[in-house]
Amino acid sequence: MFGMINLKNTFRFFLFFCFLIQADALYEDIDESELERLEYLADNIRCPKCSYGNISSSNAPISKDLKKEIASLINEGYSDQEIFDLMQDRYGDYILLDTNIEDNKSIFLIPLMILVISILVVTTYTIRKSK
């Protein structure tokens, strides 16, 4: 019993260590400030395959490839805006997660309107039911 638990813990440690080495090997050419830029860019670029999240939260192969490409672009001296423009030219406006509230007011107003209408309907129904 204890041997099996010890074996599981040893295996988990081994897997964690392997992933840690692999993560360091992916981006060993960039320093700490460039790694922060990579994280910022990956958080603001949508995964082309997943269509719901950014490339930093996706495990899709294309997301991993895009992060490697962004790391190499950072090494080559591209600015953040140049990288955003490059991704936008390649994949379209949809790839950028940068949302401007002024352009998307309906996203915020529609749920509010539904809430107000729902409250009015429930209140009206309750008043009529009680009479």
Image: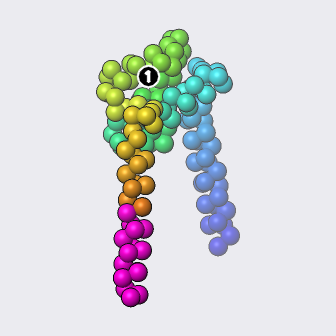
Residue nearest the viewer, comparing 128 with 47 = 128
Residue 118's place in the image compared with 55, above or below, is below
Q: In what quadrant of the picture does the N terminus appear?
A: bottom right
3 falls in the magenta region: no
The answer to whether residue 103 is left or right of residue 21 is left
Q: Is residue 64 visible?
A: no
Q: Position of residue 128 (x, y in %)?
A: 36, 82
- Give the color scheme: rainbow, by chain, secondary structure or one colour: rainbow
In the rendered view, would you say 74 is above or below 121? above
The magenta stretch spans which residues? 117-131
Residue positioned 38% across, 75% down in the render: 124
Q: Position of residue 58 (x, y in %)?
A: 44, 42
At x 57%, y 25%, the residue is 37
- Magenta span has 124? yes
Pick the front one: 27 or 37: 37
Percent across and percent down for residue 129 are 37, 85
Q: In the rendered image, which quarter is residue 52 located in? A: top left
Residue at 42% x, 74% y is 123
In the picture, residue 125 is in which quadrant? bottom left
Residue that mark 1 sits on? 84
Spot the residue most to the bottom.
Answer: 131
